[in-house]
Image (cartoon, grey):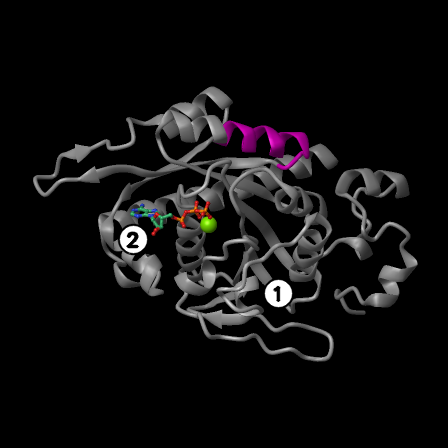
Amino acid sequence: MTTNHDESTHASCSHNQGNGEAAHASCGHHHCEHERPLQQVKHIIAVASGKGGVGKSTFAVNLSIALAQTGAKVGLIDADLYGPSIPTMFGLLDAKPEVTEKHLVPLEKWGVKLMSIGFLIETDTAVIWRGPMVSNAIKQFISEVDWSELDYLIFDLPPGTGDIQITIAQTVPLTGAIIVTTPQDVAIADVSKAVSMFRKVNVPILGVVENMSYYELPDGTKDYIFGHHGGEIFARTQGLSFLGSIPIDRAVREGGDNGTPYMLSHPDSATSKAINQATMEVARRISITEAERGNKQS
Ligand SMILES: Nc1ncnc2c1ncn2[C@@H]1O[C@H](COP(=O)(O)OP(=O)(O)OP(=O)(O)O)[C@@H](O)[C@H]1O
Ligand SMILES: [Mg+2]
């Protein structure tokens, strides 16, 4: 018996397109084994934020590399259908995934399996998709890509709380969401919306990462360009875990633009240490969240 769910098992389940808990409830099982997508993936996490440009993609990329460096099997889905960043950030602008009879084969680089709409359509083609098409594309990334066995599958979400976020939250058994923010008030205001969205759809929030926390001057002093500890204070007031602060670092931006993730080009820097620390904190929060969920179910 295989853990892959094929079309026939889908067909036998009347609610295979179901929305998480509600659909499960109707069949009386908390986890109808045959309808759960991504069965061979241990932990599924979303990197999110209400606001654009705070560093979600940058963190998702470097997190995926940091996890892969621990020996974990890692996949990364670029869920930003309107503005995919993963092809650029992984230096794969002209790459095309292989298509087999049943599946789309994810690209793989630096030990991370990747899928992005940018691999499938011309990069300069404007995507003018409406809600249902967006949901279908996301569902295809989930069930028609050959992810096989993974320890972590990371979703790099677009900004905001729209169709894509809702589709993922309702289609995928997310372990939890990581909220990325910058320290300033305007970012925090938008991020609160993302937090309440995940709470509404019962997705646990693993914690908050504060990005662009400060800029370190040549004399070692820290310039808190976007404000002081806003992300940490936000986490505390929301009752969320604080996962760490990542400084503003020119090389992080350059790594994103030239397609070599920062964690690979600067493995021993202070910024890499900060990213690694946040990664370990993410892994720790995943264990705790899953233990808590297990307790609730038993
Ligand atoms: N810690 C950092 N130091 C320097 N530059 C950074 C840092 N984090 C992100 N950047 C840069 O800021 C810009 C925005 O980052 P990124 O694309 O990751 O944000 P995003 O939240 O994914 O944006 P969007 O909402 O458009 O998806 C990029 O040019 C990126 O290289
Ligand atoms: Mg992004």
Three-letter amino acid code of the residue under disc 2: Val
- Residue at x 37% of width, y 37% of height: 244
Determine crowd level at label 1: few under 14, some 14-19, many 20+ residues with C-alpha closer than 10 A.
Answer: some
Quadrant where the image shows the N terminus? bottom right
Residue 197, position as x, y percentages in the image: 61, 32
Q: Which residue is disc 2 drawn over? A: 252
Residue for point 25% across, 55% down: 251
Q: Secondary structure at mark 1?
A: loop
The residue at which mark 1 appears reads as: 149
Task: Report the Cα–Cα distance between label 2 and label 1.
Answer: 30 Å
Residue 143 placement: quadrant: bottom right
What secondary structure prevails in the magenta region?
A: helix
| Marks 2,1: beta carbons within 8 A | no
Amino acid on which the number 1 mark rests in the picture: Glu
The residue nearer to you, when weighing 127 against 189, is 127
**Number of labelled discs?**
2
